[in-house]
């Protein structure tokens, strides 16, 4: 009889980012996503709403360094 080694439980998709952040804190690693990327994503979402409401193309003001 083969014994299957235990693995980390897989969290629900909406909690993966939080789980990753905790793992990074515990393991002393750098998170895959940065605050700059999060800010850029939020700006994209906000500009999409403005563009949809006004019908005018919006210019993004934020940037981020790509993940190596």
Image (cartoon, rainbow, N blue to C red):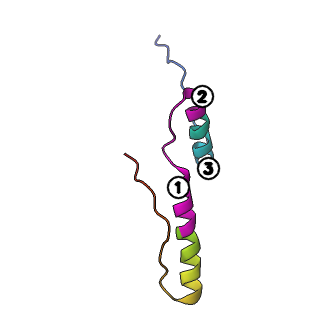
Q: How far apart are labels 3 and 1 at the CA level? A: 20 Å
Q: How far apart are labels 3 and 2 at the CA level? A: 20 Å
Q: Between 15 and 36, which is closer to the camera in this rendering? A: 36
User: For the point 51% across and 18% down, which residue is it?
Assistant: 5
Q: Residues within 10 Å of mark 2 (few under 14, many from 20)?
A: few
Question: For the residue labelled by badge 1, is the local secondary structure a helix, a strand or a loop?
Answer: helix
Range covered by the magenta-colored residues: 23-43
53 vs 33: above or below: below
The mark that comes first in sequence, 1 or 2, is 2
Q: Which residue is mark 2?
A: 26
Q: Which residue is mark 1?
A: 36
Q: At which x and y percent is residue 52?
A: 55, 83
The mark found on residue 14 in the picture is: 3
Determine if the magenta segment contains residue 17. Answer: no
The mark that comes first in sequence, 3 or 1, is 3
Helix, strand or loop: magenta stretch: helix
């Amino acid at each position: 009889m083969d014994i299957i080694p235990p693995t980390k439980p897989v969290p629900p998709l909406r909690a993966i980012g939080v789980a990753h952040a905790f793992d990074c804190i515990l393991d002393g690693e750098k998170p895959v996503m940065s605050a700059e990327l999060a800010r850029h994503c939020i700006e994209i979402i906000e500009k999409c709403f403005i563009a949809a409401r006004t019908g005018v193309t919006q210019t993004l003001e934020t940037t981020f360094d790509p993940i190596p």
